[in-house]
Image (tube, helix red, strand yellow):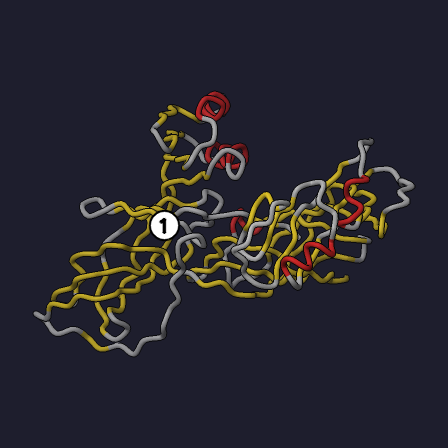
Amino acid sequence: MEKQNLNKYIVIGFAVFAVLVLVLGDVFLIGMNKPSANAATADEYITGYITANYTLESFKDIVKVFNPANFSDISQNVSAIAGVKKVYENPDQILIMTENETAPIEIYGMVNGKYGTVMRKAVLTPEGAGMINGTIEVNVSMPLEVYLNPTIGTNSTVVVSGEAAAQGGEVKYMQNSVISSNRESITISAKIVNVTETNYLYSVDFENRTMIGNGDYIKEISNIVLLSNLSKEKKDYVSWLGDKYIIVNENMTNKTKIIEDYGNVTFQDSVIRSKEKLNISYATSEDIASKVIAVSQDDQYILPNKGIMELEIKNMNSSIKGLTLVLDAEISGNLVLDYTVSSQYPVYS
C-alpha cells in the first residue's frame, strides 16, 4: 500500500482581510450540504456561512516550509537547488523564493515529511455563484491565495467554506475560510507505463521481526499495530499513541500482551526486499514483487503529481497492462488532496 502524503496545512490569505491556516485532517474537515437556492434581493444585507467553488488557477514562485525540524540543514540543502533565489528563516517557518517550476517539486521531495511540511503559494479564482446558509445564492468575485502542496494539479475545482457578508447579492467580506473536503472511497483505473524494479519479497511476522539482521537486502521493520477503536491509554511499551494505531518499541514482540491491553488489533508484517533469492527460515511468505510507474486514466478526479504514482505488484507479468485502484481519498470538488491505495486489482491485456 503506497501512501501519498499530501496537504497537511492549508493557508488561505486575503489581500485586505486575513491570512488563515488550516491543517487538513488534524483540525477539522467540513462536509457539504446540497442546497436549494433563493436569490438575494437588491439591497438585502446577509451574513452567514458560505460555500463556493473556486478554480486552482496557478502557483506562484513562493514556497514555505512549515514547522521545520532543522533550519541550517534545510537552508543549506535547499539553497543548492537550481532555481532557488533566496531563503529566509523565520521563527516557525522557512520562506523560499524560486524562479522555475522544478525547484518547488524538488524542495518538496527533499524536505516534506522529513524536515517539515512544504507548501507553495497558489491562486484561487471564484467560479461565480456561492450559497449562504445553504439557501441563498450570491455572487462571489473575491480571489484567494492559498498555500498548497506543490504537486496538486491546477485547473481543478475546490470548495471553499467560511463566514461571509453579502449585500445586493454580492459577497463583500469573507473570514475563517477553509477548503472543505470529504473522505471518500473512490475507484479509478491506471495504466502501467514502466517497471522500475523487481525484488524477492519476504514477509516476517510481528513476533519474529527482531530476528531480522543485517544483510545485502532492504529491511522494512514495522512497529505499527492497528487498533479497532480509539484509545487514550499509552502503555510503557508504546512509543506513540496515534488515532486508532500505536507504535510499539522495537523489542516488544508479545502479541498476547498487546491484545490484552488494546483488544481487537491488527499486526503488520515486516518486509525484507532482496534482488537475490534468500533462504530465510522465519519468513512467513515469499513473493516476487515489481515496482511500477502507473498513471491515472480517470477523468472525474485530478490526482496529485499529475496522476503519476509508484506502486508495487506481486507476480507481475507482461499480460498485466493496468490496474483498478480503490483509493481512500480526501476530496474537495474534483481535486484529490491526498490518498491511500487501499486495494488494487490487475487489468490484463
Q: Give the residue type that dot 1 points to.
A: Leu
Position of residue 229 measured from the top left corner of the image (x, y, whole percent): 57, 63
Q: Residue at x 22, y 77 (%)?
A: 38
Judge left or right: residue 10 versus residue 74.
left
Position of residue 306 measured from the top left corner of the image (x, y, whole percent): 53, 49
Q: Nearer the viewer, residue 267 or 182?
A: 267
Q: Nearer the viewer, residue 224 or 36?
A: 224
Judge left or right: residue 279 versus residue 101.
right
Q: Nearer the viewer, residue 246 or 304?
A: 246
Position of residue 5 measured from the top left corner of the image (x, y, whole percent): 54, 47
Position of residue 98 measured from the top left corner of the image (x, y, whole percent): 40, 30
Number of marks in the image? Answer: 1
In the displayed orientation, state which residue is furthest to the left.
43
**Which quadrant would residue 233 be assigned to in this image?**
bottom right
Q: Residue at x 39, y 35 (%)?
A: 64
Q: Compared to 341, does 282 lie above or below?
A: above
**Quadrant of image for the C terminus:** bottom right
Judge left or right: residue 9 versus residue 210.
left
Judge left or right: residue 14 versus residue 7.
left
Label 1: which residue?
A: 22
Circle 1 sits in a helix, a strand or a loop, which is it?
strand
Q: Compared to 93, does 128 lie above or below?
A: below
**Which quadrant would residue 190 be assigned to in this image?**
bottom right
